[in-house]
Amino acid sequence: MKHQHIIRIAIVLAGTLVFMWVVPALVKLGASSPQRYPFVYYSSVIEQFCFRETAGKTTVRRDASGKEYTEAQFDSIMPMLYYRQLSVNGAMPDSIQGRAVTMPEIRQHSFTYRYTPVKTASPSQGLYVMYESMPRRLTIESPGDVFRMKDGIAFVDIATNTVNEEKSALFAAELEKRGYRFPAQWSQGVISTKKPYDEGYFSLDAEGKLFHIKMVNGRPFIRDTRASDTVEVAYFDMSLVADKRFYGFLYDTSGGMYMVESPGYRLIKAELPPIDLKRDEVMIMANMFFWTVSVTTPEGRHYYALENRRLGKVDETFIAATPDGWSKSAKWLFPVYLTFENHNSEYLKPALTFTAWTAWAGNLAAAVLFVLFARRKRKNLLRQGGYILIAGIAGLIAILITPDEN
Amino acid sequence: MYTSLFYKEWIKARKLLLLLLVVFAAAVAYTLLTTIKQFHANPVAFWEFIVENNSIRTGYMRYLPLGAGILLAIVQLTPEMHNRRLKLTLHLPLDESKILCSMSGFGLALLSGLFILSGTALLLGLRIYFCPEIVYSDFIASLPWWMGGFTAYLLTVWICLEPVWKQRIFNAIPALCCISLFYTKALPGAYVPLLPWLTVLMTAGFFFPFYSAIRFKHGVQ
C-alpha cells in the first residue's frame, strides 16, 4: 500500500487541528468566568452615575463621587427607576428637574433597548409576516400568509401553500412606484402577534435606500425614509416603545447610532463613539430625562448619559474588564487556538485566535520534554520535536496518539 | 473480482440494511405525520411559529445517520477483524488499496442510497405543506447530520481496522471530537460557513483507514 507517510501526516495534522480546538475549549470551560459589572444608572435627581454592586450578601450603593447610600436613599435618588416603590412608600416626588411627573408619564417615556452582535450575524429563512398596522381591534391578528422579499415580493398563502398573485402584485407595484429596487439587502421588523403595535418592516434596497413597508387597511404603505441621503445605512433595529416616539435605531457603516423619529423619519444622532456592530453590545435604559447607555467592548464597559431630547452626552464613565483565569492561562499555554462558535455570531465557522508570544515558551517546554522522554521510542525525533515547537500541546497530543510508521 | 468483493460486503450488510430501511422509513413517516397533525390543528399558527422561531421539523432524524454509519462500519469490519480474516482479503490478486476502496466505497454507496432516499422522501413530503424557504431550512439544518453519518462510517472503519486495542482507543478520541462537530446545536443555516471544512474533514476521513490497514498488513500487535 502506498502513501503511508502522507496519510500519517494527514492524520497528525487533523489530530492537531482537533486538539487545537478541544484542549483550549476544555481549559476555557474550567478557567473562564463571566465579567461582572455593577448595575449603573444615571440619576435624574443628583445628575451623576449611580452604582449598585453586590458581592456575596453585601450590596453597596454609591454615586460617582463615592458617597454610599442606604436602600431607601438609593430609591429616592433614582425615582425614574424605582417610582413604583417610592409611590407605595408615599415618597414619590411631584416634580423632578422642575417638571411635574406622574407614574403613567414615566411609564410612557421609559424603555429599554438592547443590541447584541448576534442580531446582525444570524441566519434567516427570508420569510416575514405582514400584519395589519391599523387593526380593527386592539390585538394584532395573523394575516394568514407570509411573504418573501429578496428578488421581488411574494405573499404565500398558508392554507394553499401557493403565491397570492393579487396581493403580491399590489405590493410589487407600490414598491416600484416608490422607487424600491430589488434585490433587497435585508428587511427588519418584529415578527410576533404579541407586540404592542405594528410598524411593519424597514428594508434596505439594492441601492442602499432604507424603506418603510407596512400594510394599512389591507393596502401597502411604502415610504422612502431618505436616511440614505445623509448616512450610509448598515443596520436598522426596530424598537416598539410606549410613546411611539421613534421607529428604532439605525446604525451607519462608520458606527454612528441614530434614533429614527416617528413620524417623519428624522434622524437624531446619539453622541456616542463609533459602535462596532460585529463586537460591541449596546444597552439603553431610558427615561423622560436621561438615557443611560452602556456599550460593552472586550476592553470593558463604557457608560454614557444622554439627555433625552437631543441625545447629547452629559456624562460618561468606564469600568475596565478584569482578566479571568482563561485569559491568564491561555497566554502561557496556547499561542494559537481554534474555535468554531463565537458568542457574537450564530454562525459556525473556524477561526484561529492568536493569544501571546509568551505561549511559545509552553511549546518549547512541550518539545523539550517530548525529545527527552521519547528519544528511545520514536523515529524522526528532531522532526517531531520541531513540529511540537510549532503546534504546541495540540501537536504533542496528536503525535503521541499517532503511531510511528513501520 | 470486484463483483465477488461487493457480494461479500452485501452478505455482511444486507440484514442491517433492511433494519436501517425500516428505521429510516419509520422516522420519515413519524416526522411527516407529526408535522401534518400540527399543520391541520392550526396552519397559520404553525407557519408563524416556524417563521418567528426559525424552527425545523427534521429533528427526529438527527442521530439516525450517525447510528447508521457506525453500525454499518462495525457490521462490515468486525467479521474481517475476527481471527484476522482481513489477511485473506488483502492477499487477493488485487491491489490492497483497491480492495479497501471497494469495501469503503460499498459502505458509502449503501449509506448514500439510504440517506438520499429518506431525505428526498422527507423533503418532498414537507414541500406539500410548506414553501421552498421552509423546506430549504429543513434541508440545510439536516445536511451536517447526513455528512456526519458518512464521516462516522469512515472513522469507525479507521478504528475497526486498527490491529491494536490501545491504538483503537487513541483513534477514537479525535474521531469522537470530529463527529461532535457535525452535531452542534445551531440555527438552520448556521452551518453554511462550516460546510466546506466539514467536506474536507469527511474527504480526509476516507484515507485514514489505509493507515490502520498498513499497520495490520505489517503485523503490528
Image: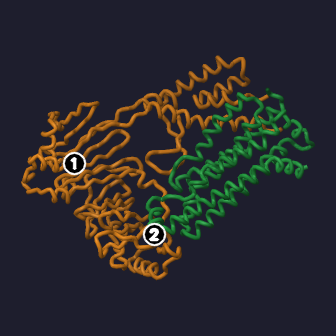
User: SS of the residue at dot 2?
Assistant: helix
**Amino acid under label 1?**
Ala
Q: Is residue A393 left or right of residue A382?
A: left
As drawn, the chain in green is B
Residue A218, horizontal then vertical, whole percent: 36, 79
Looking at the image, which residue is at 29% across and 30% down? A56
Quarter of the picture containing the N terminus of chain A is top right
As drawn, the chain in orange is A
**Amino acid under label 2?**
Val
Residue B44 tag number: 2
Mark 1 touches mark 2? (CB < 8 Å)? no
Q: Is residue A299 left or right of residue B126?
A: left
Chain letter of disc 2? B
Q: Is residue B107 above or below residue A375?
A: below
Q: How many marks?
A: 2
**Disc 1 target residue:** A305
| Near-viewer residue (B8 or A347) | B8
Chain letter of disc 1? A
- CA gap, disc 1 to disc 2? 44 Å
Looking at the image, which residue is at 36% across and 61% down? A236
Looking at the image, which residue is at 85% across and 50% down? B6
Quarter of the picture containing the C terminus of chain A is top right
Q: Are marks 1 and 2 on the same chain?
A: no
Residue A250, horizontal then vertical, whole percent: 33, 60
User: SS of the residue at dot 1?
Assistant: strand
Looking at the image, which residue is at 20% across and 60% down? A108
Residue A388 lies in quadrant: top right
Q: Is residue B15 left or right of residue A107?
A: right
Residue A38, horizontal then vertical, whole percent: 27, 38
